[in-house]
Image (tube, rainbow, N blue to C red):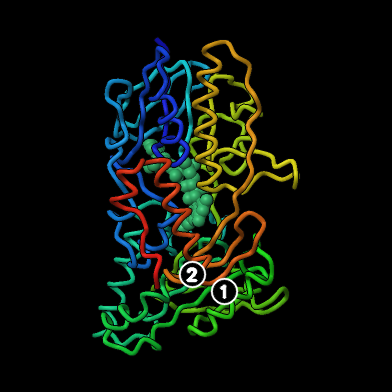
Amino acid sequence: MKEIVILGAGYAGLSALHVLQKSSADIHITLVDRNDYHYESTALHEVAAGTQSGEKISYPIMDVVNPKKTTFLQKTVEKINADEQSVLLTDGQSLNYDYLIVGLGFQSETFGIPGADVNALEMVDVKTAAKVYEHIEAQLKEYKTSKDEASLRIVVCGAGFTGIELVGSLVENTKHFAEIAGVKPEQIEIYNVEAADKILPMFSDKLGQYAINHFKKWGVKLMTGKMIKEVRPNEVVYQNGKDGDLESLHAKTIIWTTGVSGNKIVGESGFEERRGRVMVKPNLTDPTYDNVYILGDVAAVMDPASNRPYPTTAQIALKMGHYAGKDILNQMSGKASTPFSFKSLGSVASIGNTHALGLVGKAEMTAYPASVMKKVIADRSLLKTGGLKEVFAKGRFDFYH
Ligand SMILES: Cc1cc2nc3c(=O)[nH]c(=O)nc-3n(C[C@H](O)[C@H](O)[C@H](O)COP(=O)(O)OP(=O)(O)OC[C@H]3O[C@@H](n4cnc5c(N)ncnc54)[C@H](O)[C@@H]3O)c2cc1C
């Protein structure tokens, strides 16, 4: 019997699990995750803004585990020793494997900007996202006694996909924030600070403009061309333009969304990586270790069309997991691998629950159709990791608004 260890019950890990659990091959699977629940990372901004609960975007991992085939361990991975074909967990337990699937996901990237790691809040899993909301709530309550306007100010650092989605959800919850602080909604100030001159670099200017127009309408203070130089306690220091002076913004809530890298465990385990991502072979295995599949946000896969790695998304992570499950079964039965291929179905960024923008196939979409598409995409991902049960329990069906 072959032992297959899957690290991480995210999009990639669970997608691989489904393929392997369905097979009649002589295998045993050990699935490891630090949590006993799977969460939809794509909805973390909603938990951070308080428009969605952590429970709504997660479900128990045991719901998708077949105990006859799989042992689930709620434990934390410390290190992989690929030479010895073993994984060390933080409690000292060691797991041996014949095949390993690494799907340990992303972590926040601060690009060495001083103070960003300690003075800004991150949003990388359900716990950190929930902490962001608790923090906002605490500042708003504090305002009632302090009357310090910095308590009403929220700064989102970064205007990429995640930053824009977060701003959208924060705007959506402004009325609730105002009620907590006992002020008018206009008094809640949401800033979005970005080094580049444009927002949402992955989309066309036309789509970016859709978000900008709505932000203007909603009173969001969008500050592009402001390179953040330092984050101090309750203060974001930025350069005003390329050669401009240093200026600063005082706010009691500062949220960091400027980018992500792959899980640091990959580098710490000695895999050749860049920003926590391994440039994998065409069958998604590590260049040195044929029995180690590296998937999702810890992998870099070249897009032959752009000659750059594909953006790391849930969509590609799901595909990779499915492919890796099948490829392991092929390897075991002596069949040759066919290279992994990927065709993006497009991507849609939400700005609040009822507005969105993005690409579906090659077609650009905004407003209501894009918002519906965003929910359909989320339900489709949920179907792939959790099956119909989780779609009925946690899916998005509020299409009419
Ligand atoms: C706010 C936000 C919005 C996004 N929106 C979209 C979108 O609209 N569309 C899209 O396609 N992508 C989106 N993404 C990107 C997408 O979420 C990621 O690309 C995707 O989650 C990667 O999947 P994964 O399987 O590699 O890792 P993850 O889904 O992050 O799973 C990693 C798993 O590993 C576990 N883990 C981590 N470290 C350890 C450890 N040491 N020990 C044990 N377990 C561990 C975690 O608990 C987690 O379960 C968004 C991301 C964010 C943050």
Q: Position of residue 264 (x, y in %)?
A: 50, 40
Q: Which residue is mark 2?
A: 351
Would you identify the image quadrant in which residue 160 lies? bottom right
Q: Which residue is at a point 54% across and 48% down the rendered structure image?
A: 313
Would you identify the image quadrant in which residue 202 lies? bottom right
Q: Earlier in the sequence, mark 2 or mark 1?
A: 1
Residue 105: tell me if it is visible: no
Residue in the foreground of this view, choosing between 371 and 116: 371
Residue in the foreground of this view, choosing between 261 and 385: 385
Q: Residue furthest front?
A: 400
Q: Position of residue 212 (x, y in %)?
A: 59, 77
- Marks 2 and 1 sit apart, C-alpha to C-alpha, by 7 Å
**Is 378 on the left-hand or right-hand side of 393?**
right
**Is 144 on the left-hand or right-hand side of 282?**
left
Q: Position of residue 149 (x, y in %)?
A: 38, 85
- Which kind of residue does numbered mark 1 sit on? Ala
Q: Height in image: 104 above or below 400?
A: above
**Is 48 on the left-hand or right-hand side of 342?**
left
Q: Which residue is at a point 50% across and 40% down the rendered structure image?
A: 318
Would you identify the image quadrant in which residue 360 lies? bottom right
Cβ atoms at labels 2 and 1 below 8 Å apart: yes
Residue 211's disc is: 1
Residue in the foreground of this view, choosing between 164 and 77: 164
Residue 191: tell me if it is visible: yes
Q: Which residue is at a point 32% across and 78% down the rendered structure image?
A: 177
| Label 2 crowd (10 A; few <14 / some 14-19 / many >=20) | many
Say which quadrant the N terminus sits in. Answer: top left
Kindly state the secondary structure of the residue where label 1 is placed.
Answer: helix
Kindly state the secondary structure of the residue where label 2 is placed.
Answer: loop
